[in-house]
Image (spheres, helix red, strand yellow):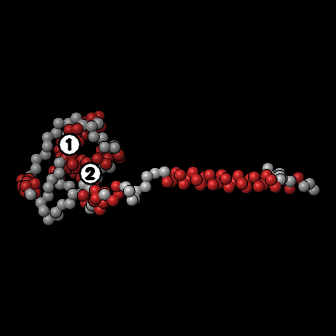
Amino acid sequence: MSDAHNEHESAIKTPKQLIMAVIGFFVVTIFGIVLLVEYVTASKLTGAGTDSQAPEAIAARIRPVSDDGYNFKDAAGPKVLQTGEAVFAAVCQACHATGAAGAPKLGDAGAWKARIAQGQDTVIKHAIEGLRAMPAKGGNPDLDDVEVARAVVYMANKSGAAFKEPEVKAAAASASAAASAK
């Protein structure tokens, strides 16, 4: 039998080459560690000597989350009806700004043409009751029918329609006026 399968050669043939290879390995490793430390410490650290302890910075870190644009509403108080643009921004924009699930995009007159041709009442009815992939009231059951109608008029008018702003019933109007007076 042949011993050819047991033969192998190494790049290191002498003890001097072995020592050089080990030293080279350590030099490359130490150089890599030094570069890594330089990379990590190159950015400005916050701490003593920075503005992280300034009163403004501290106030920004500990202010309540509710100050970041959240509006709390009094559940026992009268309902304040939102504008069409506000409802669009809060509810409708998710689909009608991107065209998700086949929703006509805001401002796309071609996509809205067939819907506008159906008439204001039909389009508003579909928005309130839901149609195909669109859930009733855009998926927000807390919206008043007038708010949904305002959002539909806003979107349709931005897309080439000339719909009129929906009328607010007397009870809702007085509640809205009373809330805005506060």
Front-most of residues 63 and 49: 49
Q: Which residue is mark 2?
A: 91
The 10 Å Cα crowd at callout 2, few under 14, some 14 to 19, many 20 or more, is some
Measuring 70% from the left and 52% from the top, which residue is drawn there? Answer: 24
The furthest residue to the front? 49
Q: Position of residue 155 (x, y in %)?
A: 23, 42
Of the 4 image quadrants, the one containing the C terminus is bottom left
Residue 117 image position (x, y, % from top left): 22, 37
Q: For this view, does 7 lie left or right of residue 133?
A: right
Q: Position of residue 156 (x, y in %)?
A: 22, 40
Q: Considering the image in quadrants, where does the N terminus appear?
A: bottom right
Q: Is residue 136 visible?
A: no
Estimate the spatial distance between the alpha carbons at disc 2 and disc 1, rounded to whole Å. Answer: 13 Å
Seen in the image, is 132 located left or right of residue 146? right
Say which residue appears at 43% left-offset and 52% top-offset.
44
Q: Residue at x 16, y 39 (%)?
A: 163
What's under tag 1, amino acid-wise? Answer: Tyr
Q: Earlier in the sequence, mark 2 or mark 1?
A: 2
The amino acid type, in three-letter code, at marker 2 is Val
Does the residue at mark 2 contact the one at mark 1 (Cβ under 8 Å)?
no
Evaluate whether residue 79 shows in this view.
yes
Q: Position of residue 91 (x, y in %)?
A: 26, 51
Residue 154 is tagged as 1
Give the image quarter of residue 73: bottom left
Question: Residue placed farthest to the right in the image?
Answer: 1
